[in-house]
Amino acid sequence: MDGIIEIAFPAEEGAAWTVTEMRESWKLANDAISVNDETGEVVDRVDHADWPLAAKLSAWLIQLHMGTLFGWINQLVLGAIALGLLIIILGYRMWWLRGRNGRPGRLQAAGQWRRTRPGVLTGIIVFLLAYMVMAPMFGISLVAFLIIDAVIQALRRR
């Protein structure tokens, strides 16, 4: 074990101490051991190499998402992604606030959806459904947004 470690006291008397390598920038493997508090011998060892692939990917994705996997470079990329999302949101806001006649894709431009290739529209829908399964909060907020939008449009038509 090397780098920063965390030592946890045993939960009850006679139980083993645990020593775990902490997550650090540019470190992809974190091992852990359990040590008998009386004899000092290692009673259990969990090597990162022995983790299932799904567990490794999950740990790496969490570190990547938090901006700790690749240090400042990771944080710079996440900042650029956030800026891009902000630009998309502001663009959508401008589109939303445009004119009294509604937004594109509504009544006056309904024919646009018919001109869209069915494969492209199907691909977008499949991607959104798959992403909604992986990111449930995205799915919940998207469905809530679509319901609120439908209610607002119904009230405007009255």
Image: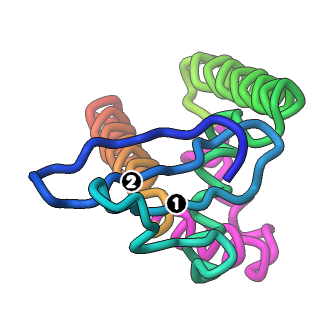
Q: Nearer the viewer, residue 94 or 135?
A: 135
Q: Quadrant of the C terminus?
A: top left
Residue at 16% across, 50% down: 11
The disc label shown at residue 32, or none: 1
Query: Most prominent secondary structure in the magenta stretch?
Result: helix
**Mark 2 surroundings within 10 Å by alpha-carbon count, few (fewer than 14), some (14 through 19), many (20 or more):** many
Q: Disc 2 designates what residue?
A: 18
Earlier residue among tags 2 and 1 = 2
Q: Nearer the viewer, residue 101 or 144?
A: 144
Residue at 39% across, 73% down: 43
Residue range highlighted in magenta: 104-132
Residue at 10% across, 52% down: 12
Q: Three-letter amino acid code at disc 2?
A: Thr
The picture quadrant where one finds residue 37 is bottom left
**Mark 1 surroundings within 10 Å by alpha-carbon count, few (fewer than 14), some (14 through 19), many (20 or more):** some
Query: Is residue 4 shown above or below 125?
Result: above
Q: Three-letter amino acid code at disc 1?
A: Ala
- The picture places residue 95, in percent across and down from the top left corner, at 67, 25
